[in-house]
Amino acid sequence: MAREIKRLLIANRGEIAVRIIYAARELGIETVAVYSEADADSLHVQLADYAVCIGGASPQESYLNIPNIIAAAEAWGADAIHPGYGFLAENPTFAKIVESHGLVFVGPKPEHIEIMGDKVEAKKAAKRAGVPLVPGTEEPIESVEEAKRVAAEIGYPVLLKAAAGGGGRGMRVVESEAEMESRFLAASSEAEAAFGDGRLYLEKFIMKPKHIEVQVFGDEYGNATHLYERECSLQRRHQKVLEEAPSPSIDEDKRREVVDYALRLVREIGYLNAGTVEFLYDENGSFYFIEMNTRVQVEHPITEMITGVDIIKSQILVAMGERLNFNGDELPINGHAIEARINAEDPENNFAPSPGRITLLHKPGGFGIRIDSHVYQGYTIPPYYDSMVAKLVAWGKDRDEAIRRMLRALDEFVLEGIRTNIPLHRRILTRKEFLNGRFYTNSLERWV
């Protein structure tokens, strides 16, 4: 059913808000930026057609303030809300409230956010779809004693994970029975504090995993497709640092296998809009479902670079009731793309955040280089939000060219007044383990 969107409110900030403004403008849609008191000078505020302050600097006062966001949408005549990523993007209550006010939510159905946001329910859906799971519990574990019994059955090491939420919080590796009680209590307490839900489940800990994710899309007419996979194995504290597409770790047969698993899950739940199905890939060539992110990913640009599909535009068009206008099986993979997350942090000081004023900025350019960012020379990075200031993307006809191009761009990137992780990216890209593809989700922790 067609739904016209003439004015879109963006319930987010930073580079993703800027990215959504660009896509909306190309579709002839006006935009409303919301911003906190700390973000009055942010680029998305300057680029949008309209802008409204929704609260104080803390996310709870502004970007997580549902009543203020809805009030802004109604006051400024928005037809729809795009949540971006983070903040309220995977909050099913927010999605329901948006729809209850007669607004279009640019994302999946609230029930899909709810199901896939609960790791236990997500695993049940994956099992029904015939998607392989890491050996472990299907229900939350009730006690330390139960955790010890299950761990003894599947063998140590095991991983305790929060049933709700993500980002590495509520997660502990347990290498022996002697460690179980203290780590169980620590993980449950952390999960309760972070998500209001202290439930945990337990699974086998894979020693040298790769992190492979598949970009998927569904529309309201039952169409489901993919945009191939991304490799996101280079992580620090379970946060992605550098991603690439396609994965250098799998061949065409394995690509077809993991894409098929992802689409099985999309079809099982009748998923709508953009999403990402994430897997661990072990040394024996087996994939295991870990979670589904019901939103656009930070790393979506590398998929756009190798497929030519504008993911944000496609999100908006599907939300308007249009059919998907691409089929992943018919799209060739064009070259290779790498994304480096440029963060305002000091790798030499335990990655301490480095907010402050940007005194000098020169962004690299040239063929095959893309930068998604909300910062500019003279802009002051506030201390209240995520430290990412830019996403630097390099495309090449193959992986070697993409790496060389990324190194050239990193050398040209001048960002003074704050500390950044640009030197870390240079080191990563020149390591022999990265160059030959022999790196895993725990590799970066050892390298730095």
Image (cartoon, grey):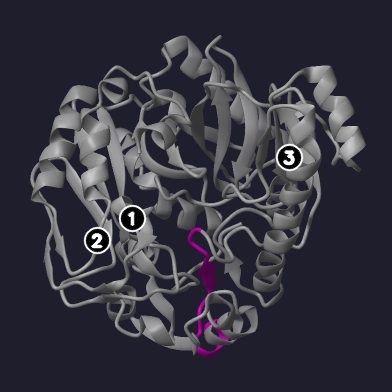
Mark 2 and mark 1 residues within 8 Å of each other at the beta carbon: yes
Q: Magenta stretch containing residue 82, yes or no? A: yes
Res. 287 visible in picture? yes
Q: Residue furthest front?
A: 178
What mark, if any, has residue 349 been given in the picture?
1
Residue 441 appears at what percent x and percent y?
A: 48, 31
What is the quadrant of residue 64 in the picture? bottom right
Residue 261 appears at what percent x and percent y?
A: 62, 24
Residue 148 drawn above or below residue 190: above
Q: Which residue is mark 2?
A: 419
Residue 63 drawn above or below residue 19: below
Circle 1: residue type: Asn
Circle 3: residue type: Ala
Assign a secondary structure to mark 1.
Answer: helix
Quadrant where the C terminus sits is top left
Tell me the mark number nearer the camera, choosing from 3 and 2: 2
Res. 121 visible in picture? no
Circle 2: residue type: Arg
Seen at 64% across and 72% down, the residue is 98
Task: Say which of 396 and 61 sits in front.
Answer: 61
Q: Magenta stretch containing residue 384, yes or no? A: no
Task: Say which of 67 and 74 sits in front.
Answer: 67
Q: Which residues are magenta?
A: 73-85
Question: Is residue 316 shown left or right of residue 267?
Answer: left
Seen at 39% across and 61% down, the residue is 16
Residue 182 appears at what percent x and percent y?
A: 76, 44
Q: Which residue is mark 3?
A: 122
Question: Is residue 126 shown left or right of residue 51?
Answer: right
Residue 442 appears at what percent x and percent y?
A: 48, 31
